[in-house]
Image: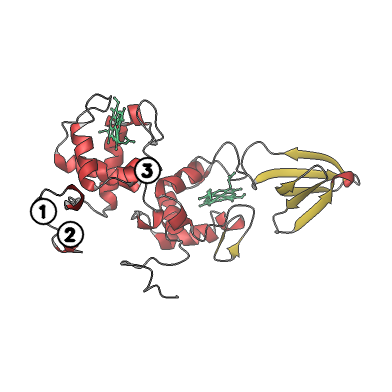
Amino acid sequence: MAMVLLAGGFLLPAQDNEKKEEDLKNPHEGKAEAVEAGRKQFLNSCSGCHGPNAEGGRGPRLLKSGVVRGSSNRQLFTLIKDGVKGSDMPPTKAPDEKIWEMVSFVKNLNAPAYEANASGNAESGGKLFHGKAGCAGCHAIAGKGGVIGPDLTNAGMSRSYANLRESLLQPSERPSEGYLGVTVTLRDGKKISGIAKNNTNYSIQVMDRQSKLYLLNKLEVSEIVFKKSSLMPEDFGKRLSKAEIDDVLAYVSRQVERVPVPGGEAGAKEQ
Ligand code: HEC
Ligand code: HEC
């Protein structure tokens, strides 16, 4: 708490007690513009080693990184400013102000999307999600929407913003278990398309777009064709404008099962 109250100036270093040393305050804390500015600098100065999406390369992955998540502001700031001696991680000459923007970006990669201060307009995003963009045809939020895609009711807590962005713009080439698209042809010629929920030697379960579940005996089946790619459309980057993408992501980022209450769980209120 004390740290928050003292925010604004630089804190005096605490007595020689490393663990208790007060963390530095990021002057850009919680600002979406700083994250965006940091992203641009990262692309210029850091992505050659850490990858354009921070996925790693010559340097370690910074997305979903335990090291980043476990680091204080002070540690990240110092690491980016001074580099890591004896490794490829170089020091930077960027002014402190710019380094803090990169700290914002790197931290933001790892925070739950709900805390990431998405820059888009969540209200417009909600209209797109449940309307024109068609997301709700496949994804449910709080019981409303389709079941072909994963439920996004708690996406703001279970995913980072970077993760959601990647899912939207570059759906995985290999679909995850439980979301494989399939078309089953029965012996009588009838075709059933949807996602394969369970596939054994004897039977296959298929959920169609109306969320009707079919349990099909393999003896009745003449052909099963799996889709190679994910059912998540790959062209939202083209179908939606840049502003619309930001809005949809802002909306999805706001989706949490329970609104987190600063200071603990005890005060959580039902809405
Ligand atoms: C020439 C390659 C290179 C460049 C450029 C580079 N890094 Fe690194 N970075 C590394 C390597 C290698 C490590 C691992 C250092 C070690 O051994 O601890 C690292 C570690 C890190 C870590 C700690 C994460 C971890 O898992 O150890 C962060 C955060 C980081 N770099 C951020 C940045 C930022 C921000 C920039 C741009 C200003 C940048 N790096 C530029 C190579 C690079
Ligand atoms: C035709 C159905 C379909 C539509 C339309 C669709 N999605 Fe998806 N989406 C999927 C499927 C299936 C997956 C699971 C991807 C996989 O692992 O193969 C998925 C995955 C995702 C994920 C990752 C979720 C996770 O838990 O990994 C996000 C986020 C997402 N979609 C958001 C959206 C948004 C936002 C829209 C609208 C702009 C949208 N989707 C439209 C079918 C769809």
User: Which residue is labeled 3 in the image?
Assistant: 66
The quadrant in which residue 4 appears is bottom left
**Which sits earlier in the primary sequence, circle 1 or circle 3?**
1
User: Which residue is labeled 1 in the image?
Assistant: 11
User: Which residue is labeled 2 in the image?
Assistant: 3
In the rendered structure, are the residues bearing label 2 and label 3 in contact, judged by CB atoms less than 8 Å apart?
Answer: no
From this view, report whether residue 70 is shown above or below residue 152.
above
Residue 104 is labelled as none
Task: Name the quadrant of the C terminus.
Answer: bottom left
**Residue in view at x 25 percent, y 41 percent:** 102
Cα–Cα span, label 2 and label 3: 24 Å
The quadrant in which residue 48 appears is top left
From this view, report whether residue 196 is shown above or below residue 251.
above
**Residue in view at x 50 percent, y 45 percent:** 167
Disc 1 crowd rating (10 Å Cα; few below 14, some 14-19, many 20+) is some
Q: Amino acid at mark 3?
A: Gly
Cα–Cα span, label 1 and label 3: 26 Å
Q: Secondary structure at mark 1?
A: loop
Number of marks drawn: 3
Q: Secondary structure at mark 2?
A: helix
Residue lying at the far front of the rendered structure: 17
Q: Position of residue 253 (x, y in %)?
A: 43, 56
